[in-house]
Amino acid sequence: MRSLIRVLVNAFALWLTTLIVGGNGDHGVWIVPISDDNGGRILTLVLVALLFGLVNGTLGRVVRFVSIPLYVLTIGLFGLIVNGLMLWIVAGLSDLAGFGLRLGGFWWGVLAALVLSVLSGVLNGLLGTSKKRDR
């Protein structure tokens, strides 16, 4: 149940990110929905959030482990580049499906990843879904 809530929180944070970083034309970050109704937009956001969680949990762990020296060298700022790369990969995968996340470029992805991580952290903190389970 907690995982479902986290996916929904991340979908909401992704929607807010597209509102903040969204642009026009080929600039910014935007969502291409499955269908034009609100249900299609919500389903697209949930699918993209789920895909982002899967990519971040698998490939993201490997990339973070391999880039530990760069994290140390940049005092953790390389994490923004890694998060932008993960968002860029999600945009590429969703582009293959014909719907989902679109980025105006890699650096738009880095900016969107920064905004998304702040929003997700705040929302998860407010809802208490970021806390570890008591055993």
Image: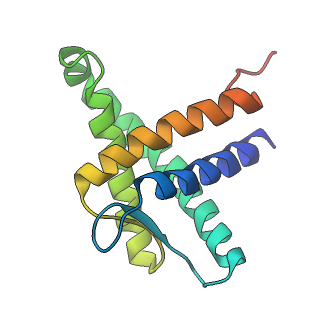
Location of the N terminus (image quadrant): top right
**Residue depicted at x 49% and y 51%:** 17
Lateral position of residue 25 relative to residue 97, left or right: left
Q: Quadrant of residue 83?
A: top left
Give the total of numbered labels. Answer: 0
Can the viewer see residue 28 in this picture?
yes
Coloring basis for residues: rainbow
Q: Position of residue 55 (x, y in %)?
A: 45, 50
Work out whether residue 68 or residue 21 is closer to the camera in this orientation and state it.
21
Lateral position of residue 106 relative to residue 3, left or right: left
Q: Position of residue 77 (x, y in %)?
A: 28, 25
Q: Quadrant of residue 102?
A: bottom left
**Residue depicted at x 41% and y 60%:** 22
Work out whether residue 56 or residue 129 is closer to the camera in this orientation and state it.
129
Lateral position of residue 58 relative to residue 127, left or right: left
**Residue depicted at x 39% and y 76%:** 96
Can the viewer see residue 85 in this picture?
no
Q: Quadrant of residue 81?
A: top left
Q: Position of residue 4 (x, y in %)?
A: 74, 48
Q: Examine the rendered structure and indicate whether residue 97 appears above or below residue 85.
A: below
**Residue depicted at x 75% and y 45%:** 5
Work out whether residue 133 or residue 99 is closer to the camera in this orientation and state it.
99
Location of the C terminus (image quadrant): top right
Q: Position of residue 34 (x, y in %)?
A: 57, 80
Lateral position of residue 8 relative to residue 79, left or right: right
